[in-house]
Image (spheres, rainbow, N blue to C red):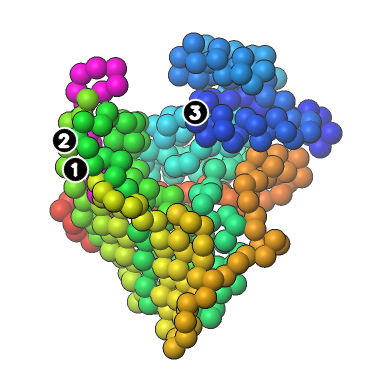
Amino acid sequence: MANATLRIGIVGAGANTRARHLPGLQRLPGVKVVMVANRTAASTQTVAKDFGIPGVARHWREVVAAPDIDAVVIGTWPNLHAEATCAALANGKHVLTEARMAAHLAQAETMAAAAKARPDLVAQIVPAPMSLDFDAAIAERLPELGPLREVCVTHTGGQFADPAMPLGWRQEFALSGVNTLMLGINYEMVQRWLGRDPEWVQADAAIFSARRPRPEGGQGEVEIPESVSVLGRYADGARLVMHFSGVELGRPRHEIRLNGERGALRFDLAVQKLWYTPLGGTETAIEPTAAQRRGWRVEEDFVASIREGAPVRLTDFATGVRYMRLTDAVWRSWSDGGVRIAL
């Protein structure tokens, strides 16, 4: 495989696949995207024409079963990630699947088991991208904070404030599962920095517009919360406090704070700025060095793991199962009236 052409098949060419994965793969030497299957025959033909892909499949199963394909990129909604991933691995294909890992925890665990049964194949999840240039700088500063006291995550916007806004796939359980707002993608970053998970979480959430118009006509039921707040506690006593909202009018907020005994970090993801405040001192900006800035290298990393055996770091299936465990626990806590769920 080191010198042979790596042949890629695409299952689901959504926005991120078209913006990131296809251009990223086609820039790499010795990599060729040879087949695509999208939701409809028309959209499949459009993607194939736009990106010069020679093979057009009528169904995603044709892609994962094709004998002349070495690896599969899955860019569908979460509801298909588990089935397509397991089928691809069973057919001897390396897999890069879009995040969130799956629709719910049981599917994620099935995917992890399928990957474990094929250690000869690469299984990778697209990582949370917003902190890639800051992860190393945050990790370097963490010891200066002293014992951690609070992890505070806030991500709000007004995308669901208007009841007349059409129903989107992120609001339908059949398509998105337990993935609520931007909970999973933000928690993945915190998990990446701390390397551990809370012992328990409890959640309160709300759906304010029970029904919304469907783009194709008619009305659809909103099944996934439009606002959710989460509390948790780590083994060392540090608190986890998260709030996500799609109904906040005004300026959106996207910030993660790590508050320690001797210092604090504040990461404003909206403006991509990081600040550090020591105990008794003033807040100062931290500019990651060129060496610390990793940037988007998802496709490059995937190909390197296949060709060189480089371990998957961003993001492996074990990590995906961990963030799905928290996402699932938040859903169960909300569904059961805010009870505490052990992780």
* Image mark for residue 210: 2
The residue to which callout 3 is attached is 14
Residue 170 in which image quadrant? top left
User: Quick check: 313 above or below 97?
Assistant: below
Q: Is residue 316 left or right of residue 170?
A: right
Quick one: label 1 or label 3, which is nearer the N terminus?
3
- Which residue is depicted at the point 65% across and 18% down? 53
Name which residue type carries label 3: Gly
Start and end of the magenta stretch? 214-227
- Which residue is depicted at the point 57% across and 19% down? 47
Name the outermost residue toward the front.
250
Quick one: label 2 or label 3, which is nearer the N terminus?
3
Name which residue type carries label 2: Ala
Judged by its main secondary structure, the magenta piece is: loop
User: Quick check: 183 above or below 68?
Assistant: below
Circles 1 and 3: CB atoms closer than 8 Å: no
- Whole-percent x and y of residue 285? 54, 71
> Is 59 a magenta residue?
no
Residue 158 in which image quadrant? top left
